[in-house]
Image: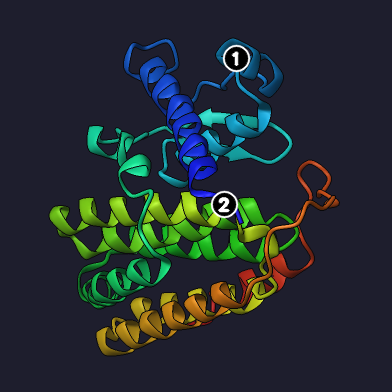
Amino acid sequence: MPTEANGAADKQLTMRVVSHIQKLIETGVLKAGNKIPPEREFATQLKISRASLRAGIGYLAAMGVLKVRHGVGTFVAEEAPAVHSFSMHLLSALNGFKPKQMFEARLVLEGGLAAMAAERGGDLHFAMMAEEVTEMYATFDDPQEYLIHDVRFHRAIAEAAGNPILAVLMETVVSAMYDDRRRTVEQSSDLRQSADMHRTIYRAIRARDAAAARKAMEQHLRLAESAQVSEPAPQPRNRARRRPGAKAPATAAAETKLRVH
């Protein structure tokens, strides 16, 4: 596992990338729909490793600022949200949190958000959740990308809940969640189970069953905590990546399942 010092250094590099890209968007250098520079070129500009660049881009993709299109490139989202100033420093501020504390916070916050989303969410929110779950089924071979869709699903629930204060709190939680999990998700052996749980949450919200949505979310978080505790220490490994534009075989089945409410 990364040491605390290494973790802090990683967070600083991630936020350096986030700050740089956010500034390019704010100043109009990058506009909605624009493609960001090629990875090698961008990493050279920032004088950082490509791994650090990917971490920052992954963070912004998880936050909805960037959109990754398989085999095409990474683009500024059409309605890219601003990354709040406190979130820009979040990863350093939460460097010392314990996983158990994070899961306790998530249980309290996200159970309620899931119930509220079931009561208040609209068709657009439901479509966003369905898209992210479908993408989870398509990315079992790429845990880092799977994680981005996982985070975006939880953000969609917070948006559907319709409370901006809770949405900001949720942004804090998912920011920390993403940074913590991106260093360990490669060791996950339960991505299908995780996707199934997210689909269950989605279906309960879509059915406007607040009690079932809360229960499904709490069950998911408890299982996620148990799975994370049992994960082996990260080990380098080579992963076969999908061909550009190709989808994992499970995608079609997932799309069919999502249409059954």
Number of residues whose C-alpha sits closer than 10 Å to that of mark 1, classed few (under 14), some (14–19) or many (20 or more): few
What kind of colouring is applied to the model shown? rainbow
Q: Nearer the viewer, residue 234 or 121?
A: 234
Q: Nearer the viewer, residue 70 or 48?
A: 48
**Marks 1/2: CA–CA distance:** 22 Å
Q: Residue 182 got which mark?
A: 2
Q: Are marks 1 and 2 in contact (CB under 8 Å)?
A: no
State left or right for residue 70 relative to residue 105: right
Coordinates of residue 182 in the picture (x, y in percent): 57, 52
Report the residue at 36% width, 35% height from top. Answer: 79
Which residue in the structure is indicated by mark 1?
A: 47
Q: Is residue 247 above or below residue 10?
A: below
Quadrant, the N terminus: bottom right
Q: Amino acid at mark 1?
A: Lys
State left or right for residue 196 relative to residue 86: right
Report the residue at 23% width, 37% height from top. Answer: 86
Q: Residue 214 got which mark?
A: none
Q: Is residue 121 above or below residue 78?
A: below
Report the residue at 76% width, 44% height from top. Answer: 245
Coordinates of residue 84 in the picture (x, y in percent): 25, 36
Mark 1 vs 2, N-terminal side: 1
Q: Nearer the viewer, residue 46 or 79?
A: 46
Q: Amino acid at mark 2?
A: Arg
Coordinates of residue 31 in the picture (x, y in percent): 42, 18
Secondary structure beneath dot 2 equals loop
**Is residue 139 visible in this depiction of the protein?**
no
Coordinates of residue 37 in the picture (x, y in percent): 61, 17
